[in-house]
Image (cartoon, rainbow, N blue to C red):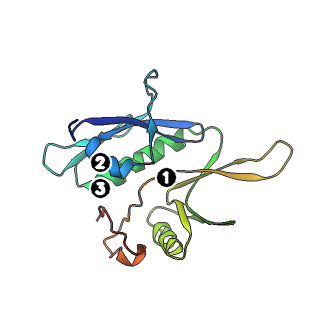
Amino acid sequence: MSSFEMRRKSVRLGSSKVAVSYPQALDPWFDGLVEPADKNVLPRKWVRLSAGNTLGRFEVLASVNPVAEGLDLGEALATFWERVSFLLVDDLRDAIAFHAAALRQENRFVLLPGRTASGKTRLALWYRAQGFDLETDEIVTASPGPEGTSTLVLGGALARPVILKASADANALLRPGETPIAHED
């Protein structure tokens, strides 16, 4: 099997689903984050990350937005997940989506809402270094609890690789023995 062979998978968040495809060589970036695609359904919303015309460069094409070309790996992954996130939230019908990081530790839960580039990821990684498990640094969903209650249930988190969007040294934010795979400048 060639490393240029495309994987066809999907990403789900609540009732929303987006078809995705990417080169097999990028499997480590998607392991545990995607599920098998439904081969019997023609996807309405999709995002494709593929090798570009220049070695080490990538392009991202989605069912919305123009193609993004000439991207390095970090830029391509950030663009890919940004477009997947938009399509998932746009089609979400069973919950409210928050732009937030979410972490948990046993029965404790931390929600860090904020705009893009507001520092959610860095603060989430600090919590992670304190022993919390990072659920997401992008999207958290909340939906109504059982009928007749006023409970709000945090129901989902968009799992994706952590992508730091600044050129600062990330090593202080990693757990011992971890190394970043790529870094977006």
Q: What residue occupies the far right of the structure in this picture?
A: 148
Estimate the x, y position of residue 64 in percent, counting from the top left.
39, 37
Nearer-the-camera pick, 116 or 167: 167
Relative height, residue 74 to residue 70 (above, below): below
Going from the N terminus, do you reach mark 2 or mark 3 first?
A: 2
Residue type beneath disc 2: Leu
Quadrant housing the C terminus: bottom left
Between the C-alphas of marks 3 and 1, the distance is: 18 Å
Instruction: List the residue tagged with mark 2.
Output: 26
Instruction: List the residue tagged with mark 1.
Output: 159
Horizontal arrangement in the rendering, residue 156 relative to residue 19 (left or right): right
- The answer to which image quadrant residue 37 occupies is top left
Estimate the x, y position of residue 57 in percent, counting from the top left.
19, 50
Instruction: List the residue tagged with mark 3.
Output: 75
Horizontal arrangement in the rendering, residue 15 relative to residue 24 (left or right): right
Question: Which residue: 47% across, 47% down?
Answer: 85
Question: Which residue: 82% across, 51% down?
Answer: 150
Quadrant housing the N terminus: top left
Is residue 68 shown to the viewer in this render? no
Is residue 116 shown to the viewer in this render? yes
Give the structural element (helix, strand or loop) at label 1.
loop
